[in-house]
Amino acid sequence: MMERSTIIQKCKRLRLCLALAVFSCLVGCGGSAVEADLLQPRVLAATFPRQLALARANWAAKGLSSYRFTVQVRCFCLEENTRPVTITVREGATDAPSRLSAFATIEKVFETLEAANTSKANALEVNFTADGWPSTSSVDPRADTSDDEYDLTISEVRPL
């Protein structure tokens, strides 16, 4: 049977090892800064300009001028306006319905979210993928206006 002093000594060593492991992870474990930043859940307005620049750079690096994606807007609006829509972009031309003109291309989505941030939206949360496109966004343009909030989901982004 181990003596009490030996057990206490081992516990102290274990705590020290755990503290060093946690510190090492906090200081920086693997992955690039771009990857780490883009994988942060819930990009908030305060960090949005930097996050947007990183996301745009990753999206541009994909080099897609022709692609297809699905967009869904959830808002306090007609049900027909909240259904998912698949949009095709060919060399910058899009087949998006006019009601989705603000989300007709991934670059338009970037511009729309940037405008919300620039106009000091009451709330702005965005999740970017590692490829750079915003997968989910939640925007509340004005604190003093009811039912102006919207959520945006972008999915199934595929090159043509």
Image (cartoon, rainbow, N blue to C red):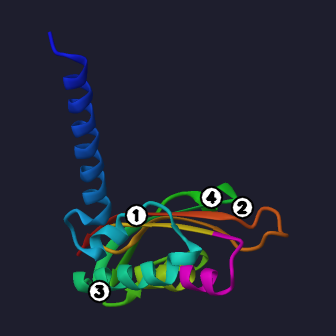
Foreground: disc 3 or disc 1: 1
Marks 2 and 1 sit apart, C-alpha to C-alpha, by 30 Å
Marks 3 and 1 sit apart, C-alpha to C-alpha, by 20 Å
Foreground: disc 2 or disc 1: 1
Given residues 143 and 66, the one toward you in this image is 143
Q: Which mark is residue 12?
A: none
Q: Which residues are magenta?
A: 113-123
Question: Relative to 56, is 103 on the left or the right?
Answer: right
Residue 50 image offset from top left, x and y in percent: 44, 83
| Residue carrying label 4 | 80
Q: Which mark is residue 40?
A: 1
The kind of residue on which mark 4 rests is Glu
The kind of residue on which mark 2 rests is Cys
Q: Quadrant of the N terminus?
A: top left
The kind of residue on which mark 3 rests is Ala
Q: How many marks?
A: 4
Foreground: disc 4 or disc 1: 1
